Amino acid sequence: LLSDCCEFRRSAMGVRGLQGFVARVCPDACQTVDLREMAEKHRIEHPDSPPVIVVDAMSCVRRWYTPESWVCGGQWREYLAILEDFINAFMAAGIKLVFYFDGVVEEKKRDEWIKRRMKNTEEITRLFQFIKTHRKQPGKEMFVLPSALPTFTRYALKSLGQKTVCTLQEADFEVAAYGLQHNCIGILGQDSDYLIYNTCPYFSIENLRLDRLVTVMYSREVLCRVLGISLTHLPLFACLLGNDIVPESMLEGFWHKCLTASPHRNSSYNRRANILLSVANYISKLPCSYSSLKHLEEILPLGSDKTLLCRGVNSYLLPGQQSPWIPPNITNCQMLSLQQQSTLCQDKEIFQVTFFLKLRYHFIAMTSYWAQKCTSHVLYDFPCLCNLCIDLVFTLRPQRSAISWSVICLAAPHSGGVKGSWAKNAEVEIAHELNTALQVGSHQSGVDRENPLPCPAGHTAFDAARGLVGFERTLLVKLLIQQHPKALLSAVLNPFSIQPVFVVKVALTQVQNLVEIDDICPGPPLKPIMPSYFFEQLAKEQHVQSENYCIFNILSHGEIECSNSLEDDYDTEIPGQALIYRPARQHIYSILLESGRGGTCPLVKEWFVYFGNPLKQPDLIQPVRPSVTGGTPNLKTLWLAKGPDVEKQRYSTFLACFHLQDEMEELQALEAPVAGFCCLLAYLMMQVSSLSLEDLNAFLALILCLKGKSAAQLTGLQLAQVDSRAVHLGAVLIRGLTTLLMANSACGFPFRMDDLMPWALFDGKLFQEKYQQSHRCCSMEELLEGN
């Protein structure tokens, strides 16, 4: 469950053969459009909203990576400049871009993912054979993306100020939904599924002319006209051609019947094109109804699961859409996941509450739980709440000499009233003494683990959570609301010097049958506890916002994967990067999963590509505690605590993942990017016994000479030849950087993520040059370019 998993290209880019079919058979569906003109038209029609294009980044990465050199490990500064030029071209036209990246490999795609990884392994083997024979980079026909390119592309776009989203499911659904919900002028990508979704226009990245912002727009309407079907038919059409849910292997007999009966067969088309035409002809004659779909499910050899077709059609329905093929009571799991993520990603105002109220020996202590659950769909998600009266959360914020406060509550009266109906926000100015009428009873929350953590507008999820404390007990509170929504507090608000709690400001619901209650009594604070699921929710927030690396996948599923790297399987002296960095990952797993009472952590499933691994099942990896003086800090300390001592703990725990805890003073004296690089290099020298002094000198010369070199200077660097071992070592180093990112995320970010990026630490051609110079035993002065 790692975004890097789709590194060599998403295994199934929509309906097989449909994109080519549109280009060859439906040329009128391929319309050349000027994106500047479309943006201007949007501004005229929607003056209050800027033109937005949502980008399926995973289908664009190959187009973006245009540096001439790709085999040496990546020309990262050149690539960063290319991305900046791409963004600037759209900005100049007043077009905002939103980038989506696949954040998971869904289980239904696991077999396909494995097949793709095996195929990539064969491609890489041929690539190394070519390099060893010709000592140069092969032609574009053997092109392979540099290792970890999609991962670092995500961070590159974020560093360039772009909105990037890492999905909780495969990206195409979320891209299509975002485009529809936000009235985007289009989707930029290269995936024929965007012809199936009924969403905003679909633009081709392959045909984009960046200098003129001209590309091809694929028309669903024209495609349907050529096929003789309607837009409503498209989801069923896609399923009957085979997709992620309905396997092609089940459809061969059906295709044969359609081909036999179709009057549209054309000898000049290939078989796949004729299948598309004949399937369209078949479904054009079906009444658009659920009974027609049920009939198809009966005649198709769908095995034991007769719901495949229904689920397949349903998977193309975006939020708010219905289909005559599907009864309205069938739930779309993708929509629920998207709603959960949408709730998670809303920009919400968050305030610090630095005090608590004691009510009849109970405390009001606000966690993110009730704030997040006060949404219109809460009673559908948790029907058990219908038996409760009202759940109250206070939101307080300083305002000059007074405190402005708001309440949020979920109205679920025992009788009468409208559940979940909303009223205007109640805000009251209160000075030192507050009056109230409250009746309090305790309520143990049993559904907390489903809740996302709110994020403040304009701040990172991690910064927002610093200092947040959760409590076991939430409270049911009945408010006395007078004619004008006010609650009068009686007694004194007593501040306590404990860590602040973040609370989301939400509107007040209509409350009925309210009862006056007793006084507020000051008292000592309840000892805070941190629910275990809290960290998973925080990690999810960071995952979606592209702020951490792998952490949510480990905490939520105990499973991660990593795609192919440019490694020479026949160089037995250098282990696979998956094995080199496994000891570091084991320490990271231990930090994240924290040993239970028995002293053991749950095993982590690893789907990592390396020589000799058939990927028939995941490797089960045991977490191992790192050696940290005083013991490994828990996540509450690493992620939420503040102060210089905590910063030191974060740094030392990070170093302990790489067995370098004793080198902290020396590493801290270096600039952060150099310290991160030296940490990685020291770890490599310990783990790979075959590394020589010449290898070490090459790496050191790389980091010392890279500083100050521009993208243009690195682009102009010419290599007389390419060394295959240096290619392998370059890939190992790049994968090491992703391990640094993982450790940094787990340890509470002792480094800025930007300081661990390859454009700060690595250049493929420069490393090749330094490697070859070092192994030729050139002088140190030449190696360091006279510096």
Image (cartoon, rainbow, N blue to C red):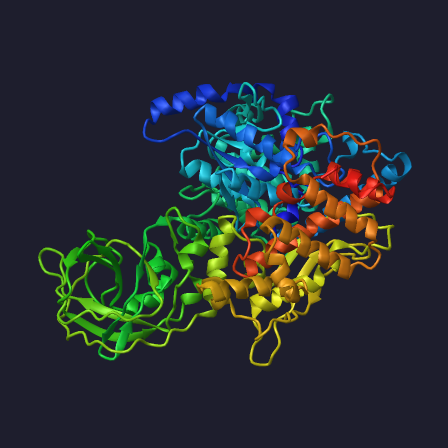
Check the image and name the residue furthest to the left. Answer: 483
How many numbered marks does the figure carry?
0
Name the foreground residue: 438 vs 572.
Answer: 572
Question: Residue 446, how many percent across, how many down?
Answer: 40, 71
Left or right: residue 378 versus residue 744 is: left
The residue that appears at 49% across and 27% down in the rendered structure is 90
Query: What residue is at 68 percent from the left and 65 percent from the top?
Result: 659
Quadrant of res 655: bottom right
Which image quarter is the N terminus in? bottom right
**Residue 225, position in %: x, y?**
53, 24
Among the 4 quarters of the image, the one containing residue 560: bottom right
Residue 37 drawn above or below residue 756: above
Residue drawn at (76%, 38%) of the image: 71
Q: Toward the viewer: 87 or 346?
A: 87
Left or right: 639 as drawn, with respect to 632:
left
**Position in image of residue 380 (x %, y %):** 36, 59
- Looking at the rendered image, the quarter that the C terminus falls into is top right
Q: Position of residue 102 (x, y in %)?
A: 57, 46
* Residue 125 appears anywhere in the view: no
Please say if 713 is above or below 333.
Answer: above
Indicate left or right for 328 with 664 as reference: left
One can see residue 388 in this view: yes
Q: Residue at x 83, y 44 (%)?
A: 774
